[in-house]
Amino acid sequence: MIIDMKYHIASLAAVFIALGIGILIGTTIIGSDTLMKKQEALITSLQTQYTALRDENRRTAEELAAIKQNSAYQQEFDRAVLPVLVREKLQGRKVAIVDINNRKEHDNLANVLREAGAEVQSITVINLNQLKDPVVRGQVATFLGKSNDITLNSLLPEFARFFAGALVTGAGEDLVRLLDDKKVLKVSGSYGLPVQDIIMISGGNSKEQDYAKIFDLVLVKAWQTDGIRIFGVEDSDVPVSYMRYYQAARLTTVDNIDSIYGQVALIQAMAGYPGHYGIKPTAEDFLPPL
């Protein structure tokens, strides 16, 4: 809005200049009292509009400054209250984070889980786009006993089954090292440790890269078979939401995990309030009962 006001003011200033020139020419050539009166009336009207726009621009700027200040206070309050809301809710729970979104850093989520008393056994960021490289894809396929000219869509289910087992059992260390070297995986923590809950951060970057059915849901099925609870989450601004896929697989979901509200919702859901939370049409409630 403020930018639009500036354009209006600039346009009016240009009109004033043009009118000034017109008045000078008009009085020189015509010298008509009627023309002068019309020009004066027009100038008065434009001055009134200019003053009104300037005042509105000032009020808008003041309102925006107040909104920004209130937002800063709200964020400070949220950060202060968050530890109180989640404290000891997940005491001793053994958790792994699997970030398939690969769009943002989610370190704060791990910190919140620790604030709640959980033991974060591992954090894995998966970049499936690296497997578009035919050389990398061929190397991974060879490790998995598949043809090195395999397509990406054919490889992803095989890769998902391997990764699901590797995280839980610690098997396949050589392939995990290769995946890390090729930047397909970025791993912190250790695989093979006991895991009760897995948090999957996902969502597609475009409809052409919607891998939910051939990767995410394969992981879900494998871990559900192992008796692990899975929570499907995504950022509030992810281009392609995966919530409908996760909900169809009977997962508890949170669609705004990049916010403090979403993180509180996840902790509370994990503590015994399953459901679908967040801000998108697929959510049933904003927050679980607190």
Image (cartoon, grey):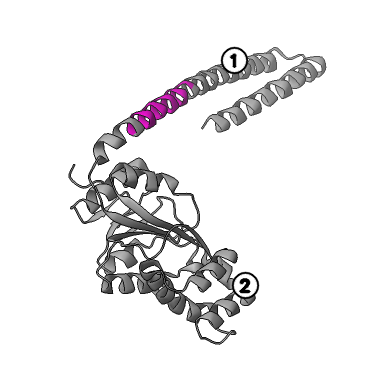
Q: Exactly how many numbered labels are in the figure?
A: 2
Residue indicated by mark 1: 44
At horizontal 59% and vertical 78% (from top left) the residue drawn is: 139
Left or right side of 14 for 231: left
Q: Which amino acid lies under the numbered mark 2 shown in the image of this protein?
A: Asp
Q: Residues within 10 Å of mark 2 (few under 14, many from 20)?
A: few
Residue indicated by mark 2: 133
Q: What element carries label 2?
A: loop
The residue segment tinted magenta is 62-78
Image quadrant holding the C terminus, namely top left
Q: Distance of mark 1 from mark 2, alpha carbons?
A: 68 Å
Q: Position of residue 87 (x, y in %)?
A: 25, 39
Q: Position of residue 197 (x, y in %)?
A: 29, 59
- Relative to residue 230, is residue 21 depicted above or below? above
- Relative to residue 5, is residue 232 depicted above or below? below
Q: Position of residue 72 (x, y in %)?
A: 42, 28
Left or right side of 21 for 47: left
Number of the label disc, if any, that sits on residue 78: none
Q: Where is residue 268 in the image (x, y as percent from the top left)?
A: 23, 47
Q: Residues within 10 Å of mark 1 (few under 14, many from 20)?
A: few
At horizontal 41% and vertical 69% (from top left) the residue drawn is: 170
